[in-house]
Amino acid sequence: MKFYLFLTLPLTAAFTVPTTKSVVHTSKPSTFALHAESAVNGADKKKVIVLGGDGFCGWPTSLYLSDQGHDVVIVDNLSRRNIDTELGCDSLTPIQSPDVRVQAWKEVSGKEMKFVNLDVYKEYDLLVQLIKDEQPDSIVHFAEQRAAPYSMKTSKTKRYTVDNNVGGSNNLCCAVIDSEVDAHIVHLGTMGVYGYGTSGGEIPEGYIDVILPGGRESNILHPAYPGSVYHATKCLDALLWQFYQKNDNLRITDLHQGIVWGTNTPQTIKDERLINRFDYDGDYGTVLNRFLMQGAMGVPLTVYGTGGQTRAFIHITDTARCIEIAINNPPKAGERVEIFNQVAETRRVRDVAKLVADQTGVEMNLLPNPRQEAAENELDVSNRKFCSLGLDPITLDEALFNEVTEVVQKYKHRCDPTKILPASFWNKKRAEECASLDPNSVKINGAASKEAVKA
Ligand code: NAD
Ligand code: USQ
């Protein structure tokens, strides 16, 4: 029998709660403003299990929730770190082991966090026992394989992504039922479930009004239109949430998040050992962070196709804030799955590239697209629910770009330039179109010409 690994530190101390200055649309934050914001106490304090709490979103969210005064238990099987090893890549930033991370947080904040090494998909009995032992108010579910390119790499990674993600979500619902703990599940979904504007007009938050044959009016889950195996797992998750809510009265919130950018938060900057991961490689690096990294290193920006793809974005600091808002606003038992669009704004990829190019002087390089996706799309997304609950979203901003650039400059010696070009292709045709891309042609600080990485 296997027991889950436990790492726990004593609880101490009063709260000092730094937080960000955030803005909507027009104003510009110059940097993180470390001013106090009311922390939770008494009845507002929640016990929260964060599944996937060692990851890019999960770690800063765990720190934020702990900083706000919630009692946080981190669960992770460290599969993301293992995939780095498999891909021969690493976070640009030197992330510490989970035990060093929680110890550092204890030293910095005086707050206890527990780390449990557990596989949500493979260790069902331990998951049930953990929920029984901890009696959480909320369980935040980040623990999935989240890279679309990795999910499209091989049959093995496609199957792993479906098994791990859908199996993990199903396990979580079963475990909440079996443990008889009325925990609110908060799941990280994706904007990609909607298909980036395919229903025309503004994308509503989860449910869409439709007129069925015969003129019958209805309000249904927005049609799913995934663009990768990874995105398909989030659509399948959404059906599981719908079923278990209806069948077992589970209280569930699904957060359809856009592309997260940035790396630091007011909590991770408190100590070098708390640093967040920064993915820059062709599989796990997301578009804006990749462009900021490439700009800082003098590498031509890897724009796929025409760069006409429009996507939604959110800063990592707002990811953490949205999770707390969701935790504080659970649906009531019997209410349908609550769905929020967790986005700050939408931008076209080539416009994002131009912002970075203008700031850094690095050129844009239009590469053949490794993905099967619309070359150009419009995207209009509602984020009214979070805004009405107090989110004042951080938008793309040059001052915050500078913060990422500083992180990149500091750790650029850790970058392997051969990992920058795309390394996963959606189908045979896309792979053939990208065949001339040479990973070894990319050199840091502009040593490789734009032509060298061109098809
Ligand atoms: P990440 O890969 O950095 O973190 C996920 C964490 O979950 C990793 O630490 C991994 O080890 C862990 N994990 C995976 N499978 C597990 C399992 N079976 N058991 C236990 N732990 C497991 O990814 P991220 O960027 O932090 O994303 C977190 C969540 O947010 C994902 O579900 C993702 O789909 C969603 N999301 C991310 C973004 C983004 O831009 N990063 C945008 C929208 C939605
Ligand atoms: N792109 C480029 N150049 C690059 C990388 C990407 O032009 O170097 C383009 C892609 O072709 C795509 C867009 O930028 O059109 C976004 O790509 P991405 O890798 O930043 O984002 P994506 O694959 O959609 O996935 C990321 C996260 C995922 C999350 C999703 C939110 O990895 O976990 O669910 O963003 S969303 O995109 O809103 O569905």
Image (spheres, rainbow, N blue to C red):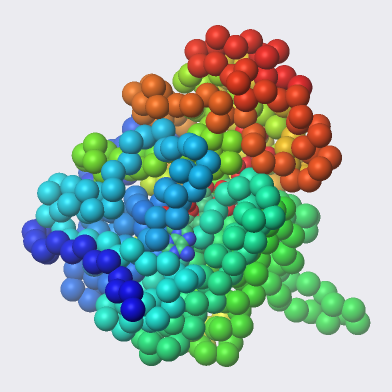
Towards the viewer: 288 or 432: 432
Please report the residue visible at 18 percent of the width from the left and 64 percent of the height from the top. Answer: 8
Q: Quadrant of the C terminus?
A: top right
Rendering coords of residue 158 (x, y %): 66, 57
Q: Position of residue 31 (x, y in %)?
A: 34, 32
Q: State the residue at coordinates (62%, 54%).
A: 157
Q: Is residue 84 left or right of residue 201?
A: left
Q: Quick one: 199 or 287, which is closer to the camera?
A: 287
Question: Seen in the image, is 223 located left or right of residue 416?
Answer: right
Q: Is residue 90 left or right of residue 191?
A: left
Q: Along the line of sight, which residue is nearer the eye, 235 or 387?
A: 235
Give how far across and how far down residue 442 sits, in percent: 59, 19
Rendered location of residue 404, percent (x, y)? 41, 30
Look at the image and tell me whether residue 377 can be seen. no
The quadrant in which the N terminus is found is bottom left
- Residue in view at x 78 percent, y 58 percent: 199
Up the image or down, 440 lies above or below 217; here it is above
The quadrant in which residue 275 appears is top left
Give the residue drawn at x 76%, y 29%. Answer: 435
Task: In the displayed orientation, state which residue is furthest to the right.
Answer: 214
